[in-house]
Image (cartoon, helix red, strand yellow):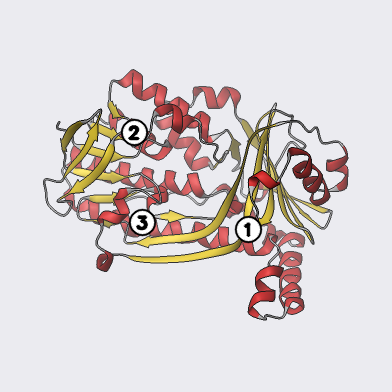
């Protein structure tokens, strides 16, 4: 098999890159280790920055999002039952975010790919990337018991943290940075109306909570739990009871509860791999970086990677400028580290670190004073709120030189 770009991973970042390249007449093949149905069954984020919304328009897959998505002009932070609204639109000169589930983004992209006729190889086993530093890299895998060989010019590794792409880069040619947090998020999805028109991030003595949503009839909620907790130890009733204790009292009193559709615990980590390019292999999204979900940056950082790689490959194939590939990693990493810093900051500001502080002997009371002062400044001053708003809606994408 021959193609211009082999894309490893059929999630939203791989699909979006494939659709954008197709729009520019650049042939690509997607290789994915699981089935399309499995991908659509994964429950993920739902807050899209303006940059991603614009990218979906450019890819020609924004129609359903514009009909069914919900534009959010603001976001709320609740500190021990005191509510602060960050007016995103007003503080940023008009920028907003879109509430539209990642599953729905993926579905729209899958439909567009099917209509385009571009090939996707699902349930590919034992995928390996070869000669990625040469001008003739190739990909091999097994599908339906038969070996498959794809010759290409470039490989986009969109296959996530546990994928083969990052591991293809020799250890002495990459550097990894990681911060593992001492807690996780227990999330519950339910077909119940959201408890608020906008997201609520809540900090309490009991721990963090987030009231999110996927649609006017589907809600997504999270609570901070110890890493030792198990999903099976949390009944739906126990989850709702604890959530209500952490959200503002007036919100909790009017919340509609119901049986869970999905329930899971996600550990939190900050992770970056540098560089994001090795020869003609480019790392995209979770293959190169992970953020705690507090800042709603995971999918959005992947989208900015896609935007940069799309520009690079368009210049290479349609402009004949192969030197453009050297810009990919530096441009991406500038935005990645900014998103990592914001997500790390939001996580530190809004979560309870008592268990970790007790283990390392830190002065809990001193730490709490620092955090109280941090929260007070950012939430009671326009300058502080503006910093949060600008980061939350997403910084502009950087153009190629």
Q: Which residue is mark 1?
A: 228
In which image quadrant can residue 335 be found? bottom left
Question: Is residue 200 rendered to the left or right of residue 83?
Answer: left
User: Alpha carbon of mark 2 to alpha carbon of mark 3: how far?
Assistant: 19 Å
Q: CA distance from mark 1 to mark 2?
A: 42 Å
As drawn, the label of residue 301 is: none
Q: Is residue 48 left or right of residue 253?
A: left
- Circle 2 SS class: helix
Q: How busy is the neighbourhood of tag 2: few (under 14 within 10 Å), some, or many (20 plus)?
A: many
Residue 97, x across and y down, in percent: 59, 40
Q: Residue at x 30, y 28 (%)?
A: 120
Above-or-below relation of 16 to 300: above
Q: Judge from the rendering whether residue 333 lies leftward or rightward of residue 252; answer left or right.
A: left
156 vs 324, nearest the viewer: 156
Which quadrant would the C terminus be assigned to in this image? bottom left
| Number of the label disc, if any, that sits on residue 20 | 2
CA gap, disc 3 and disc 1: 38 Å
> Helix, strand or loop at disc 3?
helix
Q: Which mark is residue 331?
A: 3
């Amino acid at each position: 098999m021959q193609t211009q770009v082999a894309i490893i991973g059929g999630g939203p970042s791989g699909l979006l890159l494939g659709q954008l390249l197709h729009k520019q007449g650049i042939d690509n093949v997607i290789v994915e280790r699981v089935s399309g149905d499995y991908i659509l069954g994964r429950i993920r984020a739902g807050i899209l920055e303006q940059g991603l919304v614009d990218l979906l328009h450019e890819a020609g897959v924004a129609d359903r999002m514009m009909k069914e998505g919900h534009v959010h002009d603001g976001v709320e932070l609740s500190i021990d039952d005191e509510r602060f609204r960050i007016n995103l639109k007003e503080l940023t000169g008009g920028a907003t975010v879109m509430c539209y589930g990642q599953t729905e983004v993926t579905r729209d992209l899958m439909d567009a790919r099917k209509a385009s006729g571009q090939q996707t190889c699902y349930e590919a086993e034992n995928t390996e990337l070869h000669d990625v530093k040469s001008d003739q890299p190739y990909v091999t895998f097994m599908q339906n018991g038969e070996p498959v060989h794809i010759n290409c010019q470039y490989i986009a590794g969109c296959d996530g943290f546990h994928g083969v792409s990052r591991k293809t880069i020799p250890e002495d040619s990459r550097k990894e940075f990681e911060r593992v947090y001492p807690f996780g998020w227990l999330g519950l999805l339910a077909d119940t109306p959201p408890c608020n028109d906008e997201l609520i991030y809540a900090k309490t003595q009991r721990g963090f909570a987030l009231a999110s949503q996927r649609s006017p009839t589907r809600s997504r909620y999270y609570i901070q739990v110890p890493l030792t907790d198990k999903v099976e130890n949390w009944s739906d009733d126990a989850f709702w009871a604890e959530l209500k204790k952490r959200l503002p009292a007036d919100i909790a009193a009017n919340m509609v509860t119901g049986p869970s559709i999905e329930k899971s615990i996600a550990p939190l980590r900050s992770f970056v791999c540098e560089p994001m390019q090795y020869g003609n292999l480019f790392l995209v999204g979770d293959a190169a970086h992970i953020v705690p979900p507090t800042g709603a940056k995971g999918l959005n950082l992947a989208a900015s990677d896609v935007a940069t790689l799309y520009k690079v490959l368009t210049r290479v194939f349609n402009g004949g400028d192969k030197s453009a590939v050297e810009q990919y990693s530096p441009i991406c990493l500038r935005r990645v580290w900014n998103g990592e810093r914001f997500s790390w900051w939001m996580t530190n500001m809004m979560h309870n670190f008592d268990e970790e502080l007790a283990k390392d002997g830190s002065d809990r009371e001193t730490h709490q004073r620092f955090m109280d002062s941090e929260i007070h400044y950012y939430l009671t001053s326009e300058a502080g709120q503006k910093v949060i708003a600008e980061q939350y809606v997403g910084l502009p994408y950087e153009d190629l030189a």
